[in-house]
Amino acid sequence: MAVKKFVVGCFDEEGPLFDAVKKVRKSGYKLHDVYTPFPIHGLDKAMGLRDTSIHTAGFLYAIFGTTSMLSFMTWVFTKDFPLNVGGKPHFALPAWIPITFEFTVLCACVGMVITFCYLCQLAPFVKKHHFHLRATDDRFVMVIECTPKTNESELSSFMTSIGATEVNVQNAETGWWLGRYDKEQKLFEGQSETVSA
């Protein structure tokens, strides 16, 4: 996995963070990600993220569920094991609507959850680098990726000037790894075990 250098800035409140995100993008720095303890309305647009396509994936999973269930029941009740149930025709589409609907919803829901977990790299066995231990508690953390043209000291000063209460430079793996944090995660140069409050 690639190890890259990041400048990490911590903010105490969402207001300064929101303004800082706009200033960072306007200044041309490469914004890696922003970690907040709760969702902030409009932050995705301020970060320049595009709208999600998970609803399109859900629609495709629903089409798969509908067609597979109708095809399966048509084959079973007309070809494989046709039964005369109360004089109904073998192709009894109105009777199949409830189970088709339920299977459609099941495929869409399960498919969207799996797709979301895959795209966000979420799983009980998947571990990622934590830039700040209080990012899910009460800190708003902005992470900027350093490029070859980035001057770290200038960027750190810039982060302090736009409202960051704590700024540090970290070397971190950009991807994920399998295993436990206490066994697999290594401390990199510039990253300390204790996080200042």
Image (cartoon, rainbow, N blue to C red):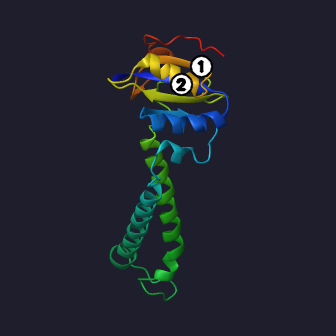
Q: Which mark is residue 166?
A: 1
Instruction: Find residue 136 and report its image quarter.
Output: top right
Closer to the camera: disc 1 or disc 2?
2
Tell me, yes or no, whether the two marked residues, 1 and 2, touch with CB atoms within 8 Å.
no
Mark 1 or mark 2: whose residue is earlier in sequence:
2
Residue 43 placed where, x, y %? 56, 44
Residue 145 placed where, x, y %? 41, 27
Q: Is residue 24 above or below residue 131?
A: below
The residue labelled by disc 2 is 159
- Label 1 vs label 2: CA separation? 9 Å
Residue 37 visible to an observer of this rendering: no
Amino acid type of the residue tagged 2 in the rendering: Met
Q: Quadrant of the C terminus?
A: top right
Residue 148 placed where, x, y %? 32, 23
Label 2 SS: helix
Residue occupying image coordinates x 51% and y 24%: 158
User: Taking 56 as reference, is 166 left or right?
Assistant: right
